Amino acid sequence: MQALLDVILPVFLVIGFGYVAVWRGFFTAQGVDALMKFSQNFAIPCLLFSAIANLDLTTSLDTRLLISFYAGAASGFALGTLGAYYIFKRGIEDSIAIGFCCLFSNSVLLGLAINERAYGPEALAGAYAIIAFHSPFCYGVGITAMEIARNRGGSPLTMVRGVARAMFRNVLVLAIIAGFIVNLGGIALPGVLRDGLDLVIRAALPTALFALGGVLMHYKPEGDARVIAMICFISLLIHPAVTFTFGIALSVPSDTFKTTVLTAAMAPGVNGYIFANMYGRAKRVAATSVLVATALTILTAWMWLMALG
């Protein structure tokens, strides 16, 4: 339990700094919006590009592991979207944004740190294999679904163009593609460029979390408690349960099985809010669910650790 607190409490401190700064008037709403744009459009893309460009894609790239994890992620997206639409009567675009929160687990900020503390650095190969495809898969699913919903009633060609345009105008997706090109092409980046990227990357997660804290000051969970509870239930219990079931059925090696399930059990990451912010849909739900689910991860991650042994 102490290991989980050591990992999660610093995250809450940064979010809390942002919340208090806006609450006490030390930071304006316009400043928070600017910080979110910086993290979303510059810092996080640099982080994704660098991570994928330097990742050894041949290490533990087990298709059984990937199928197990992403079957759970896709199930979470489907359940979250359908639940928001049919049970809570949200609009289709709001429902897709809510489903995205159930799809995108915090595999980096929480997943890597908790897995390393639980199973040691040697157990991270499976987590890195998941991370290599995490953003392309999740943003691909989310953007495609959202663009189909926004272009409903139009011609199939218009719909396809809308999806392609959104995908290739999304700076996060472009950063991921560029990272794969550099990685697979064996391209060596100049040292000065790597150093510049590292400076921006160091600001990515703290900036995004601080900005999220400021956003939470304006978005209250009034009227959204049941939707947020659904997101937490799907993200923290259903996703890892589906991953656990597929991992057993596909005989995922034991050294990566635990890492895969524990990564699936992480709370929705800040990307859940970034996606909602991109489309201006369900932002209050996304922001609050990130905070609430991260707090609950202290208990649910401990539960999964005990279940995995």
Image: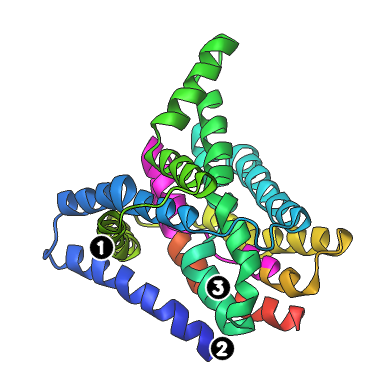
Q: Quadrant of residue 145?
A: top right
Calculate the distance from the C-alpha at mark 3 to the C-alpha at mark 1. 30 Å
Q: Can residue 151 be spotted in the picture?
A: yes
Q: Quadrant of residue 157?
A: top right
**Image x and y of residue 12, in percent:** 37, 74
Q: Nearer the viewer, mark 3 or mark 1?
A: 1
Prevailing SS of the magenta stretch: helix
**Looking at the image, which residue is at 43% across and 53% down?**
48
Residue placed furthest toward the left: 26
- Between 269 and 125, the one lying in front of the other is 125
Asked if marks 2 and 1 touch (Cβ < 8 Å), the reply is: no
Percent x, y for residue 20?
A: 22, 70
- Structural crowding at the residue carrying mark 2, measured as other residues with C-alpha within 10 Å and reported as few (<14), some (14–19) or many (≥20): few
Q: Earlier in the sequence, mark 3 or mark 1?
A: 1
| Residue at mark 2 to residue at mark 1: CA–CA distance | 33 Å
Residue 76, how many percent across, how many down?
A: 66, 50
Label 1 crowd (10 A; few <14 / some 14-19 / many >=20): few
Magenta residues, start to end: 260-289
Q: Which residue is mark 1?
A: 199
Query: Which residue in the rendered view is the most extreme toward the bottom?
Result: 2
User: Tag 3: residue type?
Assistant: Thr
Q: Is residue 171 magenta?
A: no
Q: How is the image coloured?
A: rainbow
Rendered-image quadrant of the N terminus: bottom right
The reply to whether callout 2 and callout 3 are in contact (CB within 8 Å) is no
Find disc 3 in the rendering and name its residue. Answer: 297
Q: Answer with mark 2 or mark 3, whichever residue precedes in sequence.
A: 2
Residue at which label 2 appears: 1
Residue found 79% across the figure and 73% down from its top: 254
